[in-house]
Amino acid sequence: MSVNKQITPKFHIADIPIYGDKVLSPMDGFSDQPFRGLVRQMGSAISYTEFVSCIDVTLNRRLTDWRLTYEEVERPVVFQIYDDDPSRMLEAALILEEQNPDIIDVNMGCSAKAVSARGAGAGLLKTPKKIEEIFKKLTKELSMPVTAKIRIGWDEESLNYLEVAKIIEDNGGQMIAVHGRTKEQGYGGKANWDTIAEVKQAVSIPVIGNGDIFSAKDIASMKAHTKCDAVMIGRAAIGNPWIFSGLDRDQVAPAQVKITMLEHLERMINFYGEDEGLTRFRKHAKQYMSPVSLTREQRKEIFTAKTTEDFSVLLDQMLIAS
Ligand SMILES: Cc1cc2nc3c(=O)[nH]c(=O)nc-3n(C[C@H](O)[C@H](O)[C@H](O)COP(=O)(O)O)c2cc1C
């Protein structure tokens, strides 16, 4: 199922060839090494880590250790950082460079209050001068490409995605991923794909389109609508990693669902250890099982299973026999 061995790259980020046009979104709490490893096998072309705070990096907090752990097969690997202080961002990026990612990405999309209210994440969209300073600093000092993931503005009254995209490009940024929503929208309303098309028209660096891809059909629709170089898939990939192989969840046979769930669980256990791996897997399991109608009792059983063997038996009963 691997697409990573295709001969012709779909596009390049600086001089890094990208062998595919579907990418797993960075997702705090989800796009960890086990999930990234799984979806890369299925066709995701780039590995974005969950974002890390530059404060955590510069204070050497251990939290960043497992968030930034990756495997060689995942390359190209993108470390995503967030902050509101250009100098600290540079300091953090220089520290991270030693862990040898392929790309450093600046998060300008996080709408969570704890991040955006202090001017980081989507909060940076309010300060284009700061964006300029960040890109100037990072692209001058780092030996690897610097990219950005943006929203289209703080709110409907301040849609500045074209200005921001130009600033990123003019100051050495090598790729822009655009989530077609404002900060104020959070995850509500609809992603505006027209804005992604406008950014693609306005810059000559690659553009990745993001927002509201829920089915394999949506992948083709976004590409046709925006002419973006690749699409980025977030929520729809949770419980449906097959979307990177062009399949919707209801097209996957129950036996295959079981095999993939157990592989995902095994990856989680190998990475986090048995207890932590099983616990963290539950939120994925919930999404994998969402199309299956389960009784309250079955639900409880599956989401509290204590071993891989118990889990496997339950999947046989609930998935295969259903
Ligand atoms: C649980 C969750 C965590 C997220 N964490 C991040 C993150 O760490 N960095 C980031 O740039 N975006 C993050 N996002 C936003 C996604 O990358 C993506 O832009 C958004 O979900 C829209 O895409 P979708 O409609 O395909 O889900 C997160 C989204 C979700 C749902």
Image (spheres, rainbow, N blue to C red):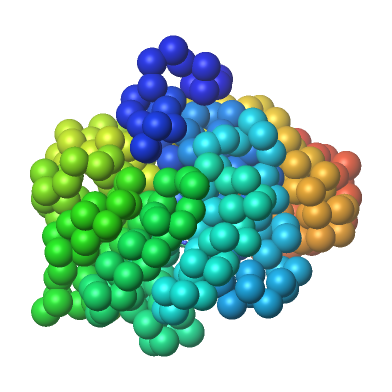
Above or below, comparing residue 74 to residue 123 in the picture = above
Q: How many labels does the image show?
A: 0
156 and 242: which is toward the camera:
156
Ligand 1 lies in quarter: bottom left
Q: Is residue 130 above or below residue 223?
A: below
In this rendering, position of residue 189 left or right of residue 106: left
- Apparent side of residue 153 relative to residue 135 in the rendered image (left or right): left
Foreground: 169 or 165?
169
Quarter of the image that includes the N terminus: top right
Q: Is residue 321 left or right of residue 117?
A: right
- Residue 267 is situated, as x and y percent measured from the top left of the image, at 75, 42
Residue 17 in sight here: yes
User: Can you give x and y, in whole percent of width and height, for residue 83 in the image?
Assistant: 47, 75
* Residue 161 seen by the camera: no
Residue at the image point whose x is 39% and y is 87% from the top:
117
Q: Which residue is drawn at the image coordinates 66% and 58% (left, top)?
A: 67
Whether 260 is drawn above or below 88: the answer is above
| Residue depicted at 52% across the width and 23% down the height | 4
Estimate the x, y position of residue 320 in percent, counting from the top left: 68, 33
Quadrant of the drawing holding the C terminus: top right
